Image (cartoon, rainbow, N blue to C red):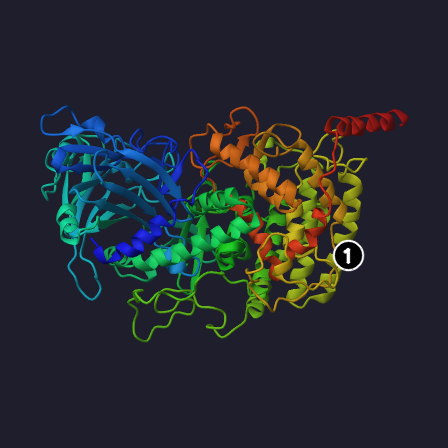
Amino acid sequence: MRLCLWPALAALVLALVDASTLTPPVLPLIVRNPYLSIWFAHAREAPWENWPMFWTGSTVGFAIMAAVPDTKTVYPLLGRSHDFLRHSSSYNVSFPQYDGATFDASTTNLTYAIPGSDVRIILSFLSPITPTSTFRQSLPAGYLTCIVEGSTDVSLYVDINGEWASGNRDNKIEWGLVRTKKSDSAKTPIKTWSIARRHEQLLTEFFDHAEWGTIHISAPADVEHQSGESNYIRRQFAEHGSLKNKVDDSYRGIFEDEPVFAFSKTFKLSAASNNSHEVAKDSAIFTFALTQDPVVQFASARGLTLMRPLWASYFFTTQEMLQYHYDDYDTAVYLARNYSEQLAKDAYASGSQDYQDIAALSARQVLGATQFSGTPESPIIFLKEISSNGNFQTVDVIFPAFPFFLYTNPQWLAYLLEPLLEHQLSGQYPNDYSMHDLGTHFPNATGHGDGNDEYMPVEECGDMLIMGLALVNALKDNTQPAFVRTAPQQALPLSLEPTKRLPLVNSYGMDRTWEDMGTTGEKAAAKWAKRSYKLWKLWTGYLVRESLIPANQLCTDDFAGWLANQTNLALKGIIGIKAMSEIASVVGEEAESKWYSDVADEYIDKWQGFGLSRDKTHAKLAYTWYGSWTTLYNIFADALLCFHLPAGKSSSLESSRFWDSDQLPLSAEAKSSTKSTFIPDAIYKMQSDWYHAVLQRYGLPLDSRHLYTKSDWEFFAAAVTSKEVRTEILQHVATWVNETVTDRPLTDLYETEGEGGFPGPDFMARPVVGGHFAFLALERACGGKASEGLKFLDEAGPAEVDVEEALMADMVENQVEMGEL
């Protein structure tokens, strides 16, 4: 209970009332990592019509109810608890008025009204995104704030079951209750249920659920608690509006007399309302956490290593972490709200209200695939390729996600790339191109010592070089998170040894700036690039040999199959070579820099002859596939890496294509580029016009083979089109979000016609939706100047293209040439 927090809570909730205009099929509730990932299923329906779900779609027991003693009525709020409430003379079961869901980047709010009364209830689920506090982002826990107002007493009930602890319902579980007392290290006494498998299976999964670790649900110490059989506990609350403070210690299976673990709280609103002559307001905070140690195993430079969670470096015990997390609520809200508000402002300026919602909806999903590990001195972020195949640290999954990290905190991108670089620098991968992933299935990064990982050599080399230079540029231009960097006055200090000063984190858990660390971003960029220079050079050598005319191989869109001479893939490789020329310059290898630049210039000229249709209306899917076309999403990297800035052009963010005049660049000292453009303007204009012509009901198809699309690549492509075409694509994607029949966390692969459903395979909850931040990453790039090189796109509307005629003409001309031969 935190009565003193009401003003802050009200501001947090009320700020979101009008924040969401889209109606996605699923919304995040508690989403922190691949195994703590709880979602509001069928989010267009009332929350009590279905159970919440794990990201795979499997249900989890998570029930929230309200009871009004005056009318002896119980109201299900979340989950199908009413299925357990048989007819009784002791209570009535009714349903509240559901006023809908709102969301921002960190929060999902569900709002209810109790019919026949002035009671209003808000369930506010917070999985805070804290870009300037890596320490807080590493905490594997989220919050539920139950907020009530009115003049009638009301009781709230929350429970979870063993499905949170294991994906196998036949497993046995054990549990316990721990209480803390107020002390210097415990500002608010709490009660915590802890639930785990009786026999854990370390680093194993069952249908993507973790089979090791402990689930915790905490509440203020003055709530009532009870565990026991689900029917009995839920009916106990329905009859009495309270629980008995008893612990069922008969450990058993998840669905063996299904045990649930419950808290309840009665809010005395009537007395408070009578005393103040105003509507009374009150709240209670609950937290949900999953602790695992180790979190993964990783074939590091020193060998196969069990990796501990990052938070374990800051706390001696799990209970210390849980208590800190609970007491840190005010700071978590402050930082998360700052991020959400800035993201909303930036996204609206860069796109529209729809883009604001899409970016907000995507943010928690990206981080829901991550595990923070390492040490305070050297953090690491591990990533699961959720749903598509479960690979560990997949390069071509990090690549579509990386605009999110560039926008949110570029240093997190360095932490993501670190395991890949360390492993390959140690000589454990035998090929002369970048590896596809660190392991066949998360959480086991055992590497591919035989070199037989998925074969995407040009893709992965290009991805790593493009991301490498993007990070170098962000560091060099001092592109640090544009969010609040100081902790609020109420922030809790870390319990560190008096003499211990962490290099990356201050005593309140906030990330230090380069200035705080006594260095500059430019020095950090050079140091980072130089450490892995032999890898950059190795991979670029491969691209020089293989990227201009790619052999038969997969690209990141591997579901589409193998294909030789891929136009878009070749472009990625060529931009990768160009990126290497910049990386070489940063580390002082000027001769090598010039050589790579010359090669890239030669290749891009040849690529235009190979990859474009004869009438120059579009890029072909493959060099020799006449009458085909492709979304040329890899051209985004050309603009992002500052290769498309007009020579000698000096600019400021005020004259940007999308940003308002009151929004300032991240670094006023960013250097003006003197480079001429690498990819000609005509190609950008050509593709922008083509996308306008081939747009379908729900978006821009991936290529001419199918009507399905990838939403990450839609945003990469739209970021480098005219404002008019960008807006068109965005509106069509927003329509899809509102109408799609998909029933899982946001998919990135969907049909652009029909019902907007899964085309097969069924992708869901994947971190690649970080690509939806492409607009925002581009606006940040090059000291805020990257989008200026694209202003020419807005000088005229899209040219009309007859798609059928253009494709047919390309095929006919090819047949004529073949006939002449």
Q: Is residue 83 visible?
A: yes
Q: In the rendered view, would you say 255 is above or below 366?
A: above
Q: Is residue 273 above or below residue 492?
A: above
Residue furthest right as drawn: 820
Q: Is residue 596 above or below residue 270?
A: below
Count numbered badges in the picture. 1
Examine the rendering and report whether any part of residue 768 can be seen. Answer: no
Residue denoted by label 1: 598
Give the camera-side residue of 110 and 299. 110
In screen coordinates, is 520 left or right of 76?
right
Task: Tell me the quarter of the image containing the C terminus.
Answer: top right
Task: From the viewer's side, name the closer residue of 687 and 591.
Answer: 687
Q: Position of residue 169 (x, y in %)?
A: 27, 31
- The extreme front residue here reads 277
Crowdedness near tag 1: few (<14), some (14–19) or many (≥20) residues, C-alpha within 10 Å: some
Residue 537, quarter of picture: bottom right
* Percent coordinates x, y for residue 360 in the rendering: 46, 46
- Quadrant hosting residue 311: bottom left
Q: Amino acid at mark 1?
A: Asp
Q: Helix, strand or loop at disc 1? A: helix
Q: Position of residue 204 (x, y in %)?
A: 36, 41
Name the image quarter holding residue 39. top left
Relative placement, left or right, of 472 versus 222 is right
The spot of residue 795 in percent (x, y) is 73, 48
The residue nearer to you, when weighing 454 against 232, is: 232
